[in-house]
Amino acid sequence: MLRPIRLQIKPFQQSTEHIDGAWWPRSRRLADELPELVTSLSERLGPIAMVGYHHGWDDAPTVLEIGDHRVELLGFSSDDPPSVILIGQDGHHLTLRVIPPDANDQSGRQALDEARIDEAAVDVVAAANRAAAARTVSDVADKLAQHEEPADAQRTAQIKQWCEQAAQQFVDAPIQTFVPILVEHIVRNRMLETRAASTSADFLLRREAASH
């Protein structure tokens, strides 16, 4: 018999808030706990493409097959309270504070109930997070550019432009803590795609030249 998921989503939320609710998993094995959470939120978010999570879980693979969908997992470090963010294929997302699995029944239930209450001073926190994310996205662009030819100024400018474009879609989203992680993931994949396309084009040109 399946046990009900221990999850609380805020009924109302201001656009500046960055926590949508709380989740109380039953263990620290992420691979065991996520399928139930993803399934329970799929109607709200649609197919979920990515889950970001604080480091500290056991059995946290980089990819999970949940139902008929492939879900990518990205771990990160942060000074904020433990949380997870679930991102749908269309960009819709939810950020949930994680209640420790070993919390006793009283404190766990209380934390779930408190998740319905709006957080104090959330506007100040969100503004600070947006400013910090903007600075870190610039650092991400510099980091990714280091993997390319140092003298290729055009490629460096292109990477920075991609980072800015990727970050722009999260400007008003309540997930600022996660923005640098998401931007790096998006742009790194784009770099790999363009590199593969370039390699394929070079191969075709060489083959065509050899045939003449």
Image (spheres, rainbow, N blue to C red):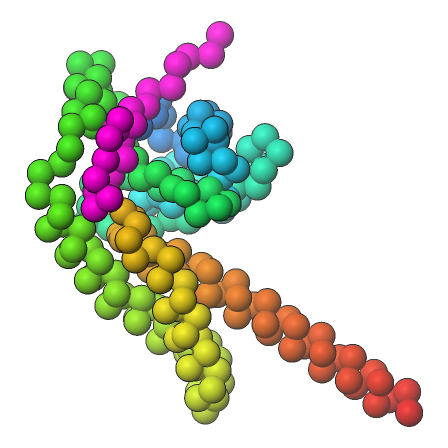
Q: Is residue 117 above or below residue 1?
A: below
- Quadrant in the rendering for residue 45: top left
Q: Which of 19 and 171 is in front in this view?
A: 171
Give the image location of residue 48, x and y in percent. Answer: 49, 39
Q: Nearer the viewer, residue 129 or 31?
A: 129
Q: In this view, does 68 lie above or below 156?
A: above
Residue 205 in magenta stretch: no
Seen at 13% across and 48% down, the residue is: 123
Give the image location of residue 127, x and y in percent. Answer: 16, 55
Q: Is residue 66 above or below residue 108?
A: below
- Quadrant in the rendering for residue 129: bottom left
Tell me if 182 is positioned left or right of 19 in this view: right
Seen at 52% across and 70% down, the residue is: 191
Instruction: Name, please, the residue furthest toward the left.
Output: 121
Q: In this view, does 186 lie above or below 205?
A: above
Residue 19 in magenta stretch: yes
Give the image location of residue 182, x and y in percent. Answer: 39, 56
Q: Is residue 31 visible?
A: no
- Quadrant in the rendering for residue 29: top left
Tell me if 24 is positioned left or right of 41 in this view: left
Give the image location of residue 128, x and y in percent. Answer: 15, 56
Q: Is residue 130 visible?
A: yes
* Region rendered in magenta: 1-22
Majority SS type along the magenta span: loop
Quadrant in which the C terminus is drawn: bottom right
Seen at 23% across and 22% down, the residue is: 112
